[in-house]
Amino acid sequence: MRRRAHRRNLAVWSSSDRAGGSWLTRPTRKRRVRGFIRTTVLLTVLGLMRFAGGAWPRGRLVLAGVVLTVTGIVLRSQPAGVVLLPGLLLIFSAPLIPAVPKADRKRNSELTRELAAYSTPAQRSDLEATLDQYPAEDTSELRAILAHQALVGASPRIAGGGRY
């Protein structure tokens, strides 16, 4: 499917326009610029979504900061322009958050997947009883994953609105 070619030589039915041009013709340059801007914005949004999704763990903060900063710049003469400062703070505070190594993220996702097998309350109580036999500092990661799974399972959510 390809774009339709725009006709440049339109017939002028009446030249009674005050500005000297016809109401039927529009400059083609505006169309090109608007098309370029739309394409650029779309590619930028897609790139930022991929950037925030998993390419960089701090990407969500940067994405939120960029959105707030752009909104603050666009609305700088209105009261909503106040969001410029929080946007800049989010952008500049993102590098200060410690990074999680890829191996740790992979191990955490594997643990989450394995612990999801304990889905019934009886299975969960057996697992918690087993975890109670070990020190808290050794089982803190497992308990945090179980608590998160219980919280997510108990709350109503939108289908497909998972964490990633």
Image: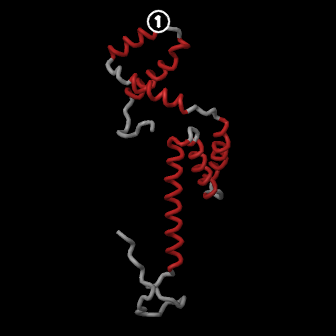
**Residue that lies at the very extreme toward the front in this rendered image:** 103
Question: Does 58 sit above or below residue 84?
Answer: above
Q: Quadrant of the C terminus?
A: top left
Question: Left or right of 81: which side holds 125?
Answer: left
Question: Does 103 sit above or below residue 131?
Answer: below
- Could you tell me which secondary element the residue under label 1 belongs to? loop
The amino acid pointed to by label 1 is Gln
The residue lying toward the viewer, choosing from 3 and 150, is: 3
- The residue depicted at 50 percent of the width and 43 percent of the height is 53
Question: Does 43 sit above or below residue 111?
Answer: below
**Tag 1 residue:** 133
Q: Quadrant of the N terminus?
A: bottom left
Where residue 93 sits, quadrant-wise, is top right
Question: Left or right of 89: which side holds 16?
Answer: left
**x, y percent for residue 103:** 53, 30
Where residue 121 sits, quadrant-wise, is top left
Question: Does 131 sit above or below residue 152?
Answer: above
**x, y percent for residue 34:** 51, 70
- The residue depicted at 42 percent of the width and 88 percent of the height is 10
